[in-house]
Amino acid sequence: MSSRRPTIGVFDSGFGGLTVLKALLELVPDADYLYFGDTARLPYGSKSVETVARYAVEAAHYLESHGAQLLVIACNTATALALDRITAAAHVPVIGVVEPGAEAASSVSKNKKIVVIGTEATVGSQAYRKALEARGLHAREKACPLLVPLVEEGWVEHPVTEQVARIYLGEAFSDGFGEADVLLLGCTHYPLLKPLLQRVAPSHVNIVDSAESTARAVAVRATELLPKQTSTSEERRATPRLKFFATDSVEKFRRLGERFLGHSIDSVEHVDLKE
Ligand code: DGL
């Protein structure tokens, strides 16, 4: 990796965090990226705080030891359950997805009522609800565990997914939350379902994507934290260098990852993290 352009480490339980990397490449193109997908140990969304924290800290150390100067915890579950543990264990700044997502949702909502969807673990942690309530908003969190496997199956525009989303959102936008005006996507996989969710959600609802909000927060932090490194305009204009690490099949990471990133993935290295 370049010694002059900042190196940003992006961590996720698997492929989903590539939606955050995709947003980062658009908003912060003058950096190089290391992406770590813990594909051998996903899903994180059904695991305990202890397990998720241990896995996430290992991944953060791996990215740091490979030169990451700023860590982006793209995984909503890892952020919700373990951001404090990761931050305490890391020697570089760490940005998670919950605060930027809550901030963006709060600025979009007019009536201060928000529905957040995420994994079981994210919802169980109430991290989004706390972040939103701290900003004076009312939030309902709804776990949508079937959506991650449906997205990984590639069923982003499938009648089954539409039916599942209709049931989840029907339950979420009810009992006092029918007038909630923002749907906050609190899971890496959900940006791929944005068109479908926009159709299924009540028509007055705006969708806020924590991947995009996080990329905007990283853009600010990257310039604050690494001001002297992006030196010549030629270096700034260079295409970001990307390196991917996966704990399970490199082949599968390439194949599935391309769907999330939106372009081909080269240079994936297999990593064996010892328990
Ligand atoms: N990356 C996870 C998240 O954003 C979803 C996949 C998983 O459960 O590991 O919550």
Image (tube, rainbow, N blue to C red):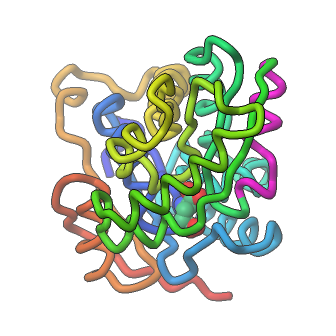
Identify the residue at horizontal 81%, vertical 54% (top origin).
125
Image-based side of 34 in relation to 84, left or right? left
Image point (81%, 18%), residue name? 136
Q: Position of residue 109 (x, y in %)?
A: 61, 17
Locate residue 222, reporting x and y percent: 48, 28
Quadrant containing ligand 1 reads bottom right
In the image, residue 167 sits, relative to residue 104, either above or below, namely below
Q: Quadrant of residue 108?
A: top right
**204 in magenta:** no
Query: Residues in magenta?
Result: 122-135
Q: Is residue 64 visible?
A: no
Q: Residue at x 71, y 18 (%)?
A: 112
Decide: is 40 above or below 108: below
The answer to whether one can see residue 3 in this image is yes
The reply to whether the magenta stretch includes residue 130 is yes
| In-front residue for pair 21/213 | 213
